[in-house]
Amino acid sequence: MTATTASRSALEIEARPPSRLLALAEGRAVFELAAFYATRHLLGMLPKGDGHPVLVLPGFLASDSSTVPMRRLLDDLGYESHGWDLGRNVRVDLQRVHEMEALLLKICKDSGRKVSIVGWSLGGVFARELAKLHPEAVRQVISLGSPIHDDRRHTNAGRLFEYLNGKDPEPLKHGHFTGLDEAPPVPTTSILTRTDGIVHWRGSVQHPHKGHGETENIEVRASHIGLGVNPSVMVALADRLGQPDGKWKPFKARLTQRWMFPQTRLH
């Protein structure tokens, strides 16, 4: 077997959805939601932000209602949070892309400041693509369990996505949403979990050679469905959003927080 063939085989092994056991275990998200509200007072004591706008994009089949807890926390921390106001995240077409572009640019213009974008699952894919289209309007991108690779075999939702959007959604035919593993030219954080039951964790890993130097991966202990309310994710979000504009540094958990963030190698 040649080196090229071996490399291809390794990629094929990696490009697989999570196990059925992990998918069935996604129900534990209810406990993460309970933990969010149980620690809500403590989360409200996280470092305050500088008031810049944060656009939060929901995951596949979800709507703004799924991101309400996160956005309310961000508001309490001093940010100006925004939902996407586009209903359920189902169809991926040029109209949806243009609507997101218009929303991003309006928020940027109205606030007079760059926008941080937080995207959950498919919302994270959108966030990265928006930053590629309008890097001048984006401060940073943070994705939560997002399938940031072109191979849809990384996710259990791939077949349903293709049933609703086709194998080649409209934006792909117009040159958008290609090279998903290439990070946009802004600071970019991928928050992921090895116990994700929807998107295989390898499908969420950013590789430094696929973008500029300001990219990172943060591993947490969470389910896919619970990423938007998991307390450890909120800690990481507050840290990333709280960085001064133009002074990005890789995430480094405080000593008292390290138990939340596994120190494993992601490759």
Image (tube, rainbow, N blue to C red):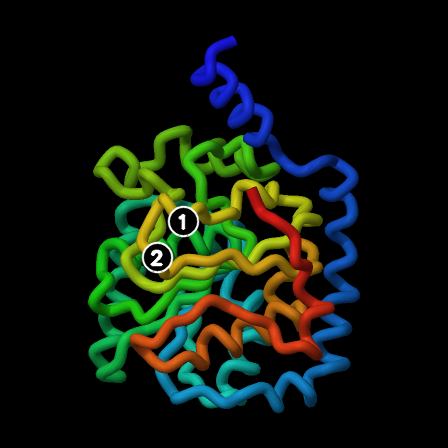
In the picture, measured across the screen, residue 190 lies left or right of residue 226, that is: left
* Displayed quadrant of residue 252: bottom right
- Name the residue rendered at 40%, 60% in the picture: 188
Q: How many other residues sit within 10 Å of disc 1, few (<14), some (14-19) or many (≥20)?
A: some
Indicate the position of residue 27 as horizontal and vertical percent values.
Answer: 77, 54
* Displayed quadrant of residue 160: top right
In the image, what residue type sits under mark 2?
A: Gly
* Displayed quadrant of residue 170: top left
- Disc 2 target residue: 213
Give the label on residue 112, or none.
none
- Name the residue rendered at 36%, 64% in the picture: 187
Residue 159 visible in image = no
Residue 264 vs residue 77, the one in the foreground: 264
- Name the residue rendered at 45%, 87% in the picture: 49
Pointers 1 and 2 in contact (C-beta within 8 Å):
yes
In the image, what residue type sits under mark 1?
A: Pro
Give the quarter of the figure containing the C terminus: top right
Give the label on residue 208, or none.
1
Sequence-first tag of 1 and 2:
1
Residue at disc 2, secondary structure = loop
Number of marks in the rendered image = 2
Above/below status of 85 relative to 216 = below
Indicate the position of residue 171 as horizontal and vertical percent values.
Answer: 29, 41
Residue 207 visible in image = yes
Indicate the position of residue 17 as horizontal and vertical percent values.
Answer: 62, 35
Residue 119 vs residue 1, the one in the foreground: 1
Above/below status of 18 relative to 55 = above
Above/below status of 218 relative to 6 = below
In the picture, measured across the screen, residue 129 lies left or right of residue 122, that is: left
